[in-house]
Image (cartoon, coloured by chain):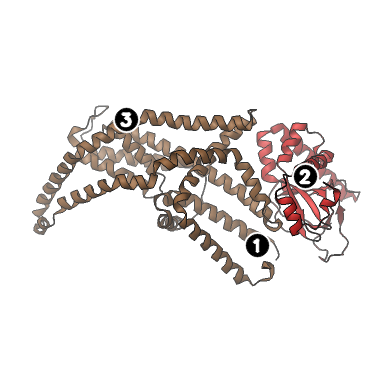
Amino acid sequence: MDMENRPYWLKWFLGILVLLGSVFALYIVRNTLIPLLISMLIAYLLTPLADYLEHRGLGRILAITSTFLLFFGLIVLVVLYLFPLIRDQVVDLTTALPRTLALLNTRIDDLQARLAVYWPTIEQVDVGVRIQQAALDTLNAVPTYLANVFSIFPLLILVPLISFFFLKDGRRIRRGFLNSVPNRYFETVMGLTYEVDQKIGNYVRGQLLRSTVIGFLTFFGLKLCGLKYSLLLAIFAGVMNLIPYAGPFIASIPAVVLAILHQSTAQALLPLFSPLPLVVHVILVYVMVQTLDAIWVAPYILGWSVDIHPLGIVLVLLFGNQLFGWWGIILAVPAASIIKLTVQAVSNRYRFYPT
Amino acid sequence: MSRSDKTEPVPSLQWMWANIFRKGDADQVAIRESIEKIPLFHDLTKKELHRVEEALYLRRYRANSFIFRAGEPGLGMYIIHAGSVWIQRPEEPDSDDSEPFLELGPGDFFGEMALFEENVHLVSARAHTHTALLGFFRPDLMTLSHYYPRLGCKLFLALGRVISDRFRASLTGGPVGA
């Protein structure tokens, strides 16, 4: 098909058709995509290190093998170390749960009773039972949900395998791809590939570092407050921070709830010399961590601008959720960044090329 | 591998099938020979030459197709591996048989100014016959000089010399050396 002489609107129409087609195709295979995407992410992270080692004199194979072992070795160590800690806290949590829920129930009844003085009708709304039921339902659903999202075993095998090959042959894959691009688009595609590479690489590494920092800060803050399960909450906060806007807020909810309930059983690391209730301290911790993040961590570590209007980001997140669920939300922003760069590159090309 | 390989009509089905599974070793040797002769890479050691080679892309063009037109943004330079290229000024007509401002052959290169910054080409480059070019682009040059500073220095120095030669020639109206 001779695209050069077709009317303008036809090119746009076909372009959009192709885009929608690809999105649809991706949607169909979305489950199998996840190990692939995770592997690519890991390869992205590790490639600079492997490149550095290689350029320092280690052969390519040796360089990637060492990087690979280093990375996964680190993960194994961390898991081995953290696992008992996490397991203890999870066990603690599940055994304490019925008692906690009962406590929550009584508190709510209390509150209801107090409010009933002003609003007699409130007695009829059995809020306590509703909440308890909802909580139990959610908790029962969590294990199955987690299993679906993370289906560990395929991940454990596939991810290291695929990421090793991406590390080893990533460069060759890119060259192969570029070599197959027709002359007319070659320079544009090549420039685009490099730009995307840089942007996404920076984004991924930056986000990871940021999550870690936030996790640490939250951990120390919560430990100072004396809140139980501080490790779990800190990890949760770190991970949740990957989700823009809503993430940090969601991360604080369990902590706040726990703080309300464990007022009396809190063991502070440092003697709490302020008379304020635990809840306030906990909220303060989260707020401070977020502020530090906004002022210092994010600008310094990331140092990038995605260049998308905040409203655009919200839309993008909604689409991400619709298409890919949790992973969609996390991956939506970099994906949008890629799309934006592509559109810019293509429109630049059409602007400069006379035909 | 024979010389006629390169003058064969490029995107024909026959050519494609002959080349699709070929490992390209013959190509590699030919490329290496081509590179060694270029004055730009005279100062490089064998290892450095190999590294540059890894960063090159072999592109094939049909006769009379444009490699780039004046006004288009440029990403890097092209070294002529085989064939001939006409360089045309923007104000000259586009027709097939107008005399070019400059005609280049194997071993020559053009477009090196695009290696330095993102800017538009000043002239058009058109493949006169079926042509094979070796592309060397800005991102690769930057990556190379990041990891191998010495190599980067040598390349930048050589490029600087070339550009100043051409500038001098354009001012004095003297011959343009490759």
Within-10-Å neighbours for mark 1: few <14, some 14–19, many 20+: few
Chain identifier matching the brown colour in the rendered picture = A
Residue in view at x 53 percent, y 59 percent: A22
Q: Which residue position holds label 1?
A: A350
| Three-letter code, disc 3 | Leu
**Chain letter of the residue carrying label 1:** A
Q: Give residue A335's position: percent from left, percent from top.
A: 50, 52
Residue A238 in the figure: left or right of residue B130 = left
Q: Is residue A277 visible?
A: no
Camera-side mark, 2 or 3: 2
- A103 w.r.t. B74: above or below: above
At label 3, counting other C-alpha atoms closer than 10 Å, the crowd grade (few under 14, some 14-19, many 20 or more) is: some
* Marks 3/1: CA–CA distance: 57 Å
Against A127, is A241 above or below? above
What percent of the width, then of the height, locates residue B87? 83, 56
Residue closer to the observer: B27 or A332: B27
**Residue annotated with mark 2:** B27
Where does residue A185 sit, x and y in percent of width and height? 67, 57
The residue tagged 3 is A85
